[in-house]
Structure formats: C-alpha cells, structure tokens
Image (spheres, rainbow, N blue to C red):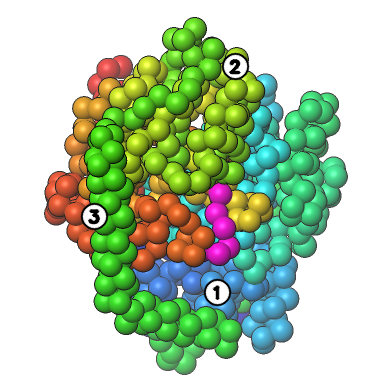
Amino acid sequence: MGGLDRLIVTTLSFLSSPRGNYFMSELLAAIASAAERRGVATSLGGGSFPQAATDAAFIVIPHEFFALAPDGEEANAQALSRTVGLCVEQPGTYSFEVTCGLAPRLGGMIAVHPAACRELGRRGIAAAHFPLGYIPEWDTWQNKEAERAIDVLYLGSHDERRAALLASYGETLWPRRQRIVLARPEWHRGPGPSFVVGQEKHALLRSSKVMLNLHREGATGVEWVRVLEAVCNGAVVITEHSRDYAPLVAGEHFVSGRPGDLGLLADLLLDDNRRLRDLRDSAYRFIREELPLDRSIDQLLAVTDALPARRPAMTARRAPHAGRDDAAQDAEIARRLAVHLREELQPLRAAIKELTAQALQTRHALARLEHAAAGEVRLEPTLVTETDAYGTVTPRVSVAVALDHRERDVITTLESIAASEHDSFEILILDDASTDDSVAAVSSFLAERPWLPARLLCHPSRRGLGATRNALVVRARGASVLILDAGNAAYPTALVRLEQALAGDPGASLAYPLGVVVLDGKPTGLASAHAWHPTWLRAGNYIDSTVMLRRDQLLAIGGYCEDSRVGGYEDYDLWCRLADRGARGVHVPEMLASYRRTSHGTFESSTNTAELLTSIDDVESRSLILARAPRLFGPGLVDDPYRAVGLHAQRSRADSQAAS
C-alpha cells in the first residue's frame, strides 16, 4: 500500500541493541512473531540499519536503541524516515523523556500505554496506540493443571519505592512461600543473577499462585508486559491501583488495591482457592479470546503504510540529557555536589576514624590492665547461665547472637528465635563486656523460658565483633550456624527455609535471606536483595550480616576477621575470602529477617564499635580486605556476571545433551 510519496513496505525489520535490556528484545521478537502470523515478512536485527533493505520499515525502542546501538546514533535520514519508534515507557519516567526527545526524528511512533499516546500528542508527536495482548510464545501453561509451589511472586527492578512497599508486606507474608526477584538497576543483556528471562521467567510464573505488581517511581499506568506474562501463565495479578488497564476489568481479571494493602490482599486471596481459580481462568480466557496481540499488527501496519519515502537530512545523535526537566537536572547537580563533598571530607573522616579507633583500643587495654591488676586476666568467655532445655537437645542449627550494649534490642532478637518453627535449634548469646544491663536482661529472659535451649556467656574484657562471633561458632553444636546480631530479628520460618536452602545446594557455604530494613519501627527497604555473585562483591558489600553458614567450612577458613582495622567490615571480609576460595552463597529470595536502624545515624546513637567505625571511614578496611582476597580482586575474574551465567548455562546444556 501507499502512494508515490509513501514507502512501500514489504518487510518489518525489528532492531534491538545487543547491549540493551534482554526483555526489550523478547518483546520485539514476540511482536515479530505476531506479524508473521498475519502474513507479514519480518526480520530481527541487532544494532544496525540494513543498508540494502530498501523495502523495509524498521521498528526500534528509541530510548535504548539510539543510546546503545553501535551505529544507531549516526543513522542517515533515509533510515530514520523508515523507522517506527515503539514507546514502552510511561510518562513520568526518564526513559519516556528520552523517547520524546528522539521521536520527532523518526518516521512514525506507536506506544504501548494510552497515557504515553496522550502525552506524546500533547507535545505535538503523533503516536498510534499499540495495545499488547495474548502472546502464544509466552503461554507455557495452556490452562492445564500445574503445581504452584510459590505463593507470592514479585519480578521487577529494585528501587526505593518498590523496596519500601515490599518490606511493609514482610510481617504479613512471612508464612507464605515467596519469591522476590529484584533486578539491579542496570542494563541486563541476558539471564543472570537476580534477573530471569524467557522460559525460566515463564516457569516461575507458571509455578506461582499470585504475582504482585508495583509501579516504578513516577509511573501510574499498568505494567502491561508484566501483567500479560503473568496471565499467560496462570498467575493472578495483584496490583496497586493503575490507570489505562482497559479492556481488563478490575475484580474480574485482576485484583487492585492501595499500595500498602497488597500484602494483605495476597494473604486473603491465597486463603480463597475458589476466588483464586476464578480470577485465573477469567483473565486467561479473556486475553486469549478477546485480546490477541495479532490484532494489534494492523495498527503497526497503518503507521508503516504512512511512512514517507524520504525526508530532509537529519541525524539522530545520542543526547544524554534529552528531555530531562529542571527537577532531574537539580537532582543531578545535588548528587554531584554530594560526591564532591564526600571526597573533600575524606581525609578528615580518615583522621577521625584513626583517632576513634585509637581511643577505643586504649579504653579496652585499660580495662584489661584493671582485670590483670585484680588477678582476673581471662580471654575466654565465662558461662553466665543456661536453660534447663539446653542440655537435653542435639541441635542441627545454632543461632549465634553477639551482644554489645543492646539490652533492649536483644530481647526482640531472642523473642523472634523463640517463636521459630524449627524443631532442632539452640541459642548461644555472648556479651562482649557490655557496661549496660544487657546481661541482666538476657538472664531474666532465659529464666522465664526454661523450655528454650539457650546459653548465655560473657567476655570479661572486650574482644570485638569478630572474636565474639568466632567464640560462638567454636561453641556451637549445630552443623549450621545462623549469625543474628542483637537488634536484628528472624521470622518464624527463617531457620527452616535457610536450612532447606543449604540442604538443597550442597555446594553452597552459606544461605542468606531477603531482609526487611526497619527504621524507627517502620519498614523502609530491603537488605540482601540480590543473588550471590563475586563480581558484585568487588564493587562493595550488598549482603547483610544475617546468614546461615556451614560450621565446618567457617572454621576451616579461619572464621571472622579479628583485626580491629577491618572496622565493621567483618561480614564483607568473610564473603570476599569465601569467594576468593571459590566458595559461594545461595540467596533465599524471601523476607525472612529484619534489620533495625535508627534515624539518628549510627555515629550518634550506636555504642557498637563496628558500626561506629564503619560510619566514619572505610579506606583502610577495604585495603585490608583486598589484600586478604587477592584472586577475587585480581584481573582474572569474569567482569560480566551475565556472561558468566550464560557460559555456565551453555556448559550445562552441552552436558545434558552429551548425557542424553
């Protein structure tokens, strides 16, 4: 079709950058398949405009393609006039603003979200609505009975808003089987740690009863791709209130609620199997019968039919700040200023840390001299009390609680373990010469619970966090040790699920859960949110202290570092040394623990030496850690975790094929 001044299109060429987010390529491939089912010739390309394809219209996702494609930014006017931009972003996001800046240079625009069409139109950019719908390639369920072992699934990028909302669901969802997969905010070129794609993602959805949907910061429209993938695989969507979800019907095809209520809605729905089944079947039947993606190809063809044969010379160049508003620019200036101030203050922070460390060491040395003068020189901890039940159990798991001036917080920690659903554990508490009433508080707690297998010990003089934890591990009787510092807490299912994770992965040295960060009593975010990967450890610590370790392997590596210069990085040092020796951890993506924080800041409010020193400066600590893990920080490690995972997957497939 088309007149003399229009491009005669016989092929749709879908182009994506090989360096872009993998799910964008997945979406383009699905649209290409729908076009082929409508009898349209298609091709899939990566990063280049084919020079010989004079009868082709190009389909790109502008905010990614022109930023990441090798020659996309230097495209000639002829290619641009034959290019249709597919806007998949929502108004209010940075990527949408980039798309708006690029759209006038293209021959046409289509948009997934009606709100995007409206906003583009308001800015003088014509954009046709391209509604997404049922995609056969995504449907691995086929409306067949399936085992759904996961109660609650979340798939999405990690940002502050989403993390805070998910954290608020922890108290409600801990009894449920969760799978919280938070992708790091970076380009994902393929499957990798904390990022699932393709068949693995569809298998997760097919194994899940409900899927939570939360908006990204600045967005309010329904996340169509995520919702459709869930419905195609029989997972019921529970989303915060959204706009532009028609023709889907809230209450008939999905559940909608206020952001803070989604955890409760999921919990209630999981108790109503009939309602769950009705929602699942109704949504699946509707999108398959009434909303096939194939029908939307007509909208795309209408746009390509209207493409001009050529247009005046114009070059699409990468514009890092295209479309950024004043608020975004102010935020960037503030960020750079904060970085500059940190750099300027670094020498002062280092000097303060050195003086603080010396003062603390002097104080501890004086305490030891006082003990020596009194004839009380002892380094080993002494027994304060143990419960009646302690000698009657042979525990599989030992919970190690290092106590340092936390008389109020430690009771919360012990109460959480006392409520555990595990059937064979002990609690070991070691006070590191606290000067408050921590020992008395714990003694009273244990006296009231003789049925709880527990023992309280005390250092006569201060030894530090590393030495305290090591003393606990040496005295532990369980094959696995859960490190749980005073102030932190574990949900009742934590011991069971972490032990199961270690049992299910015999090659793992430790298991760690997703943790809810509690600030002044209010859940505000998530800790330990991502899977184990040595490359990420090179950049810094992202795994919090609450972990379950195999006791024998921890002893074999020498335990935690006792050098005071590590200054609060005992956990990070241990993870790095384990990774340096080829050991690994297994992430349990369930909210199973909580971490208490205060708004006053660790320097002002904490008497914990490790927190105090970490809050001041970390240059010397990091230097020591680098020296203790030379292979991890050397040049030989694969820098791209997705490449590493991809190579592993290729080897696994090759091994499977060879075996068969």
For this rendering, which residue is in front, 315 or 482?
A: 482
Q: Residue visible at 25% across and 50% down?
A: 365
Q: Does the magenta segment cover residue 643?
A: no
Q: Which residue is rendered at x = 55% and y = 64% of the image?
A: 600
First along the sequence among labels 2 and 1? 1
Residue pushed farthest front? Answer: 374
Q: Which badge, 1 or 3, is on the more N-terminal residue? A: 1
Q: In the drawing, does residue 274 fall left or right of residue 405?
A: right
- Camera-side residue of 508 and 620: 620
Nearer mark to the viewer, of 2 and 1: 2
Task: Find residue 450 and name its label.
Answer: 2
- Quarter-wise, where is residue 472 in the image? top left
Q: CA distance from mark 2 to mark 1?
A: 58 Å
Residue at the image position 34 percent from the left and 22 percent from the top: 475
- Residue 50 point in image, percent of width and height: 35, 68
Q: Amino acid at mark 1?
A: Tyr
Q: Quadrant of residue 508?
A: top left
**Residue at label 3?**
565
Residue 501 appears in the figure: no
Magenta segment's dominant SS is loop
**Secondary structure of the residue carrying numbered label 1:** helix
Q: Do we see residue 374 in this rendering?
A: yes
Q: If you read the primary sequence from the N terminus, does the residue marked by circle 2 or circle 3 appear first? A: 2
Q: Which residue is mark 1?
A: 94
Q: Amino acid at mark 2?
A: Pro
From the top left corner, tell me how far across and down residue 496 is, in percent. Answer: 53, 23
Q: Residues within 10 Å of mark 3 (few under 14, many from 20)?
A: some
Label 1 vs label 3: CA separation? Answer: 42 Å
| Discs 1/3, front | 3
| Residue 536 spot, x, y in % from top left | 33, 52
